[in-house]
Each structure stands twice: as structure tokens, then as C-alpha cells.
Amino acid sequence: MASTLKQVKDGESVVDNSSAVGGGVDDVYGEDRASEDQLITPWTVSVASGYTLLRDPHHNKGLAFTERERDSHYLRGLLPPAVVTQELQEKKLMQNIRSYEVPLHRYVAMMELEERNERLFYKLLIDNVEELLPVVYTPTVGEACQKYGSIFKRPQGLYISLKEKGKILEVLRNWPERNIQVIVVTDGERILGLGDLGCQGMGIPVGKLALYTALGGVRPSACLPITIDVGTNNQKLLDDEFYIGLRQKRATGKEYYDLLEEFMSAVKQNYGEKVLVQFEDFANHNAFELLAKYRTSHLVFNDDIQGTASVVLAGLVASLKLLGGSLADHTFLFLGAGEAGTGIAELIALEISTKTNIHIDEARKKIWLVDSKGLIVSSRKETLQHFKKPWAHEHEPLSTLLDAVKAIKPSVLIGTSGVGQTFTQDVVEAMAAFNERPLIMALSNPTSQAECTAEQAYTWTQGRAIFSSGSPFDPYEYNGSLFIPGQANNAYIFPGLGFGLVISGAIRVHDEMLLAASEALANQVTQEHYDKGMIYPPLTNIRKISAYIAANVAAKAYDLGLATRLPRPADLVKYAESCMYTPNYRSYR
């Protein structure tokens, strides 16, 4: 271990993880090679007191330390005499969390648990995923980011600002873990539907990587949250005495892209070719540019563009059993033409093209987009941003969504606008007028920004709508029937997709891998789910779902010649499940 660290510190070589277990990370403590009933050593240095162990979140077990462990690790007197199980700890903590009425208080309680006892944090999250996912991620994480300066206690990731220009490689080496598989990075400019939150956007990478571990099985030690701080244009934050970031307007142009170039180069130099970098919540103008620039030279993925597209495509494919026909038989209308909207539209067009063997330009003609200036049509082409131009079709200009719905007559209405209550009653009733089962996807986050609520969609269509949203809505009863809204949550896709890239040792992300992830998710929807109006499976099965997605993605990586972990496992689903991190306590020598 010491020699490995010296190599990294001295910059002489990049660690070769090709022979390590569990997806390529050095197994310092023997956690992967050991079964759960085998002993492991929680120390890598000599200690005089177990006080240090109790403050190490990676190995602290609290009252679950056994009598023998208390003797062996100098814990006598540092803990009350009771010895309890992890299950009893989980029961107590869930009672405590449920006692908080304010969602942000629950978020803070979960983050404090992660800083105190990492395995117990993930045990809670895995066993209570439907209840706690909205706490550690959307919608609560949005409020957490807005107030991050006030609730900030300990750093949970790396902060790389303009002050570190020229020293980013050195900053990466300050992180205590040397063998990283997944990095989630944001510059905080477009956090959910809340806009520019600057340095306080760190809540997003922290939350995403918690899901990579809980839902996808990537070990926590292999995950690294990073915020790139180039300033903020949010004057409220700049005037806030508790703001934790740079107090300046955002850097743009060459200064911005030079910093990102140094960052991406340093990541590859420090962690190698197979580290996944997930871009998160960058503004449109930078998100497309960064993805296009680095997708051919790095293992990169943009969840807002590609992850959202993949999960929505999965819902569309699954919904065909309720709607009838194929994707090519339907017409799609989007409200919102940013990263999410154009990313989803492009993946739908790619899937139609793949299934029907028509040119992708023909497939795009089934898809229409409305932005802030109205329907995107060919007469507007000269003034459009480059990522909108493929969607400029021949049609008379229309200024409102309602006019577009009446003229285009879509069977699927998708909202990615980031503006709440834009699917008005007139719009939804128009959809219901020419569709027996209108599919309405109000995808904007958080809940307050959803284009309409589940109750509105079901009520305004007399219970005929198939509805899904980006943030969760409660089941709704209409005329004696109980409808369970689908949640097109990126958490269905990105943990399994990322894990599939890790276990295959993939070196690039290809669009066909996104299609493979969508197909795997759609296949998990059963007739029982369809009978309840669901087009996504319950999140309670998410670890199993992620294993199937990982296996499908890994298989595509092998088929495309992009996988480096050889030989190819005979059963990729079993291999994925065997590599997954489990949060159960280990016994210490």
C-alpha cells in the first residue's frame, strides 16, 4: 500500500487496477476478498486508543462492536456496555428520522449519519430506498443546496476553484482515497430547476454518488464528489455572509475552458483511463460543449443529457404495451429544448432509427420541441442554438404550447422546461381530446417545478392519462381506481449504467450503451405494474434492476470492443451482483 501511495504521490506512474477485485479498486482492507463472516483488519496504522476508530466513518460500528472487538481495539470504557445488532441500530435511526417533520432536517440527519457510520448510512438507504431517496436526493437535495452554506459542517468532496488553477493535479492528490472509479462533477450553474447555486451545488455530486453506492453497488471509497467553483452570478449568494464559494461573477470563455481542460487532464493522469467522469448540472451552453469535447478522449457521461434520455426512453418503451404500436407510430411534443429535452429527443430518434432502419433525420420528424419562443420550426433556424437546429421542422410558427398541441396532435407530451404548472388544464384536456390514453411526462425537478401534478393529469383526463414525473407524487384515487404515478427518476439508470462501465473496464461511453440500459429497465416492468398504470418498476427492487442494467451495458461494451476487463464473464448478471458493495458490518480481528 505504501509503495502504491508513493507512486501516486511522486507522479511516477498511474496505479494499475486491472487485477483488483470488485471492479478494479485496490482492496486495502480485504473487504471484497473476505466473505461477511470472515475477519478483516480496520487499521492501516498503529494506534494507542480505539477513540480514533469510533471517529472513522468507514469502520465505526457504534454499539455493534462485539465484546471481543472492544477488547482488541481499545474500546473499553469508550462505549456504553450494551452490544446491539446493526438491525436494531437501523430501527432506532429510522424512528428518529421519521420523527422530523421538516424534510431538510431529515437530510441533515442522514448526512450526519454518513459522516459518523458509513455502513449504517447505506444500510438505511438500501433497505428504505423509496422512503429515503427523496430525502438524500430530489426534491430535498434542492433545498439543501440552497442552504448549503448554513448547513455545511465537514467537506464531503473536493472543491476546485480558480484559485487552484495550475495545481489541480496536486489538489486531486489531497483526497485520501487513491483508487477512484466514479467522479461526479458540477460547476453549480444549473442546479435542478433552481438555477445558479455556485459552490453550494456540491449537494448534487454528494447525493448522486450516495446513489451510485446504494443503488448501483459501487464502493463508497471509489467515489469522488467534485465541485468546480468559477464564481456565481447569483447576487443573493454573493451577498450572503454564509456563502462558502468564490465571491465573484462566473468566469467564462477561455478562462473557464482552460480550467476544465486542466481538470480533465489531471483526472486521467491521476486515476487512469477507466475512471468515469459524470458531468452534472452544467448550464446548457457548457454541457453540450464539454460532452462533445471529451466523449472521444475520456470515459464521460452527462446525466442531464444522457441519463434523463435513457430513463425516459425506458418509460416510453414500456408504455407501448399500454399505448399500442411502436415508437415510430407515435408523435412526441416537448416543452423545453435544453439539455434534457434535446437529449431525450435525440435518443428517441436513435431508437426509432435503429428499430426501423430509417435515417435518423427521418426519425427526428416524429419529434417536435417548444421553447420559450414557441414551436421550433425551420423559419427560426438562423437564430437557433446549434443543439436545437435538428428539431426545426417545416411548419407555420406557433407561439404557445396549447397551439402546438392542437396543431401537432402528439400522443406523448413531455415537459423538461423547469417551469411549474405549464401543462395547464386546457393543454391536458386537448391531449385527452384526441388520445384514448395520453402519455404525459412532467419531468422537471423539484416537485414545485413539475409541469403539472399527478392529480391534475388524472383529473383532467378523467383517469385516462398515463402519467410520470421527475419528482415523486403520491398515488391518487379517481372514481374508485387507484393510480400510481411513475417516476422517471435518473436513479433508475445512472447507477447501473456506471456500474456496468466499471465492471467491464469500459474506456468510452457509446450511445448504444444508453439504449441497452433503457431496454434493460423497460424489461423489468411486469403485467402487475401495468395493471396499476405504472411504466417503471418499483424502486424497492432497484439493486436487482441495477444489476440487470449493468450486465446489459457491460455486454454492449464487450460487443463494441470497448471493455478492457478480460476474459468476459460467462454470466454478467451474476458477476454484477457479486461485485456489488454490501453495507453489512464486518468482523474485526
Image (spheres, grey):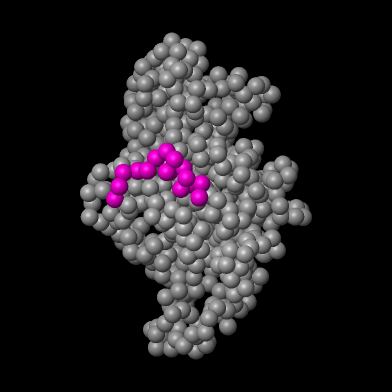
Q: Is residue 316 above or below residue 227?
A: above
Q: Magenta segment, which residues?
A: 247-262
Q: Tell me the residue at 57%/79% (across/down).
A: 41
Q: Residue at x 34, y 40 (%)?
A: 195
Q: Is residue 174 above or below residue 316?
A: below
- Magenta stretch secondary structure, dominant: helix
Which quadrant holds the C terminus? Answer: bottom right
- Give percent across and percent down for residue 199: 36, 51
For the image, the number of numbered tags is 0
Image quadrant occupied by the N terminus: bottom right
- Residue 312 in picture, x, y percent from top left: 52, 36
Q: Residue at point 53% right, 72% down?
A: 585
- Residue 1 is covered by the magenta coloring: no
Whole-percent x, y for residue 324 in the image: 58, 25
Residue reaching furthest top?
396
Residue 469 seen from this side: no
Give the image location of residue 454, x and y in percent: 39, 35
Foreground of the two, 412 or 165:
165
Left or right: residue 272 compared with residue 442: right
**Nearest to the observer: residue 484 or residue 27:** 27
Q: Is residue 239 left or right of residue 129?
A: left
Nearest the viewer among 482 and 414 is 414
* Corner quadrant of residue 464: top left
Q: Is residue 448 above or below residue 438?
A: below
Residue beneath the point at 28% across and 54% down: 243
